[in-house]
Amino acid sequence: MTERRLLLATGNPGKVREIRRALEGLPLEVVGLSDVLPVKPPAERGRTFAENARAKGLYYSRRWPGPVLAEDSGLEVDALGGAPGVRSARFSAPRPSDEKNIRRVLRQLEGVPPAKRRARFVCAMVVVLNGRVIAEFRGEVEGRIASEPRGESGFGYDPIFYYPPLKKTFAELSGGSKNEISHRGRAVRGLRAYFEAKIKALSGDAPDRA
């Protein structure tokens, strides 16, 4: 793995920002799709976050010479049977937006008491190189859905995802605090450890078969 530019296979600026922050200090240049590879994204047809992440990683790997980091993540609400799930970003289709997605979740949970509004954020990440998945990571964080949006930070469903240990929604947390506990932050810690080991192996001239 000699290419030191890591392509983040997402057009979501919030995700790019969070992952860049989490990988700071590594000798990798983290680049987004809009910076270097403005191509049409693949259709997301997977039934799980992991399936979608693999499909995206393989798709962009055919167009990029170095490592590709692809991820799929979203919100699962127990009272909604796990929805929005893999449809999190497009829950309010045909013209989805963060605000419309949030309104739809809150509308479907009207009358549901706090104790039954359990939910979790899930993140599946893969690293793909030369058309082959070489590493996978997963992160989850449990919480519940607030009765109304709170906070101005974050993106997506952050304003309604309440994290009981801190008594705040994700949108009320600083970027650093969120990365410490979030689903994406937990997956990225595994990713960071993976790249640290790879870079150490390269620096020591150890064999690297990935």
Image: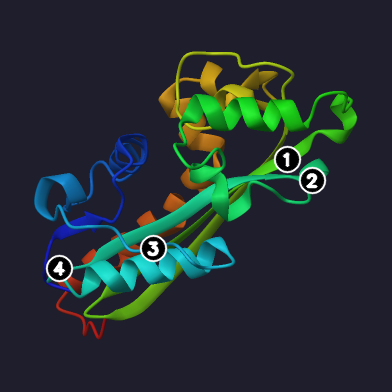
Q: What residue lies at 51% left-to-right and 36% top-to-bottom?
A: 180
Which of pointers 1 and 2 lies earlier in the amino acid sequence?
2
Assess whether mark 2 and mark 1 are in contact (beta carbons under 8 angstroms).
yes
Mark 3: few/some/many CA within 10 Å (<14, 14-19, 20+): few
The span from disc 1 to disc 2 (Cα, nearest Å) is 6 Å
Q: Secondary structure at mark 4?
A: loop
Assess whether mark 1 and mark 4 are in contact (beta carbons under 8 angstroms).
no
Q: Is residue 143 left or right of residue 25?
A: right
Mark 2: few/some/many CA within 10 Å (<14, 14-19, 20+): some
Circle 1 residue? 119
Report the number of discs. 4
Q: Which mark is residue 43?
A: 3
Q: Quadrant of residue 1?
A: bottom left
Q: Which mark is residue 64?
A: 4
Q: Position of residue 96 (x, y in %)?
A: 47, 36
Which of pointers 2 and 3 lies earlier in the amino acid sequence?
3
Q: What residue lies at 88% left-to-right and 23% top-to-bottom?
A: 111
Which of pointers 4 and 3 lies earlier in the amino acid sequence?
3
Q: Secondary structure at mark 1?
A: strand
Q: What residue lies at 59% left-to-right and 67% top-to-bottom?
A: 47
